[in-house]
Image (spheres, grey):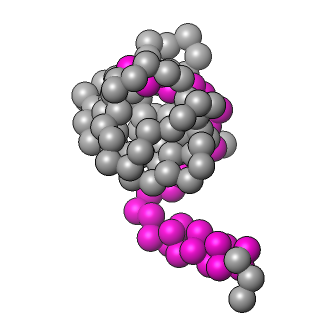
Amino acid sequence: MSELFLNRQLESQLEERRAVPRFSCGETAFVVSPVSTVAHIEDISLNGLRLRFSDSPPTEGVELDLRIQLVEGTTSVAMRAEVRRVEGAAVGVEFTWMNRTARTTLERYCQGRAAA
């Protein structure tokens, strides 16, 4: 079997396993710690993000403190996420903490993307 076919099979299995849908996103995440940097948000769900770093991405298991602004002109929200997967410059993170305001903002954003 070709490597491309196997990658597509794996991606299909991951999609089926996900508990919540993911949505394309073109916003920016500000990584506050462990190092200060910026990442592009490729996709978003209620459980996490897929980030693309222009410089060296963090390694699996690292906790990131993030600030993201999902709606232009609104206040950014803070959250914490753990790096679960690294693929080159792309990193999949799972949210581990956010306050109620951040959760509400995230839910509204995802609901709006689902309706679009």
* Image-quadrant location for residue 4: bottom right
Query: Which region of the structure is painted magenta?
Result: 4-32
- 56, 10: nearer the viewer: 56
Q: Is residue 25 magenta?
A: yes
Residue at image coords 59%, 43% = 89
Q: Point out the image quarter for the C terminus.
A: top right
Q: Quadrant of residue 18?
A: bottom left
* Residue at the extreme bottom of the image, as rendered: 1
Measuring from the top left, give residue 53's x and y in whole percent.
Answer: 58, 34
Q: Residue at x 57, y 74 (%)?
A: 10
Residue at 67% in and 73% down:
8
Instruction: Identify whether 30 is placed above or below 8.
Output: above
Residue 26 is at least partly visible in this image: yes
Q: Residue at x 44, y 70 (%)?
A: 17
Query: In which quadrant is the N terminus drawn?
Result: bottom right
> x and y percent of residue 41 in the render?
57, 35
Residue 70 visible to an observer of this rendering? no
Q: Is residue 104 left or right of residue 13?
A: left
